[in-house]
Image (cartoon, rainbow, N blue to C red):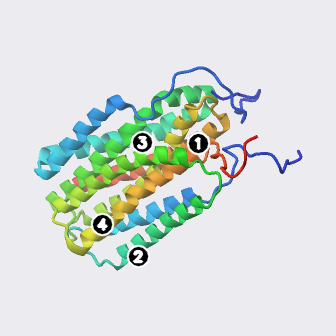
Amino acid sequence: MAVMTADGVPSAEPTAIPRRAIQIVPLKGLPVVAVIVVGLVVSIAANWRWALMFYHVAGGGLWTGIDLFVGFVIGPILGRLSIPARAEFSSKFMPMMVLIMPTLVLMTLAAGFQTAVNLGNLDPASVNHGWLVVSFIIVGILATVALGVLEPANVAVLWEMNKPRPNGEVIARLMRRFVYAAGITGAMQVATLVIMTRITTQ
Amino acid sequence: MIADATATPTAGARRFPPVTQLAIGSLALVVTGGIVMAGNFPNPPALAIPVVLLVGSAFLWALSLLLLSRHPGFAWGAFFKVARWALVAYVVIAGMIEFAFVHNNASGAPLLVISLMLVIFALDVPLSIGFTVARFQEPAPDPNVPRR
């Protein structure tokens, strides 16, 4: 855990305290992910309409909700916590995010694409086609921020915290990156909510 | 404060080539290409723009790896340890996307372009994660420098 100076700024000087190693990928969760992915493949292969809608709506709702909650509720709170408190919270929170978020994204996008194909919404003649392309663009920005910035920062924080002498400055720097990226993805999710409700009511 | 030119920089303070920026640029190009392809699906799109985006993305990915390979003292051990597991995860995700296109009768040149885009996508994310982790690790010892 990081050393703090008197004004609450983390010291770059690492220090050692005895604690349990953090499991970066929670292995107990992998069978659940495997069941979800297999179910998704079967749903797409069979064009099972209810299951596709379930995967898309449940996955998308959770993805949006978690992004908004992390970006606008957890993020600002985390930013105001002391470095040791942040590190303690992150060591429990971030391994779960490593599994949950990619699974939700995969569920939402794969089932959503198949549903759009089945409903004819991807057809250029469809009234929803333009909205879908806009939603692709938003998802593209989300994916670039999440995969290029957020997830690497997430894994790197956990890796740093697993060291015998974690560097508080490195953790603070990566957490700042994580919190800003979560804020951007949260804002993009508001646009997704507008588009998706628009598509379903046209 | 007087800078000490002989001081060894800490893992977090060392300067690296702009691998993160290049990897994000590569990812952005390949995602844009994916949007162009998916936006026209199931009709086959004109492939000129997606191919240009694909080539640009592959170039940025290769450039970032080249710059990294020329950077002395990078923690390659940590990089590969992280990147290989990330690669497994993103091969599964890319495979899932590929399956969705194949299931909907994508074929020929458009499928080839999509497949190559997915390859770059599956390589971009491990590069980005592996680099972000490894840049904060202590550099590997130089085998040419004798131990005291």
Residue A67 numbered tag: 3
**Mark in the foreground, 4 or 1:** 4
Same chain assignment for discs 2 and 1: no
Q: Are marks 3 and 4 in contact (CB under 8 Å)?
A: no
Q: Earlier in the sequence, mark 1 or mark 3?
A: 3
Residue at disc 2, secondary structure: helix
Name the amino acid, label 3: Asp
What residue is at 24 percent from the left and 43 percent from the top? A37
Q: Quadrant of residue A170?
A: top right
Left or right of A141, for residue A80: right
The disc, 2 or 4, on the residue closer to the chain's N-terminal end is 2
Give the spatial CA distance, label 2 vs label 3. 32 Å
| Other-residue count near label 3 (Cα within 10 Å), few / some / many at <14 / 14–19 / ≥20 | many
Q: Name the foreground residue: B115 vs A82.
A: B115
Q: Chain of mark 2?
A: B
Q: Are marks 3 and 4 on the same chain?
A: no
Q: Residue at x 42, y 37 (%)?
A: A97
Disc 4 residue type? Ile
Depth-wise, is mark 1 or mark 3 nearer the camera? 1
**Residue wearing tag 2:** B52
Of the 4 image quadrants, the one containing the N terminus of chain B is: top right
* Residue at left offset 69%, top offset 52%: B144
Q: Nearer the viewer, mark 2 or mark 3?
A: 2
At mark 1, the secondary structure is helix
Residue bearing the label numbered 1: A174
Q: Residues within 10 Å of mark 1 (few under 14, many from 20)?
A: many
Give residue B114's mark. 4
- Regarding residue A187, the answer to whether it shows in the image is no
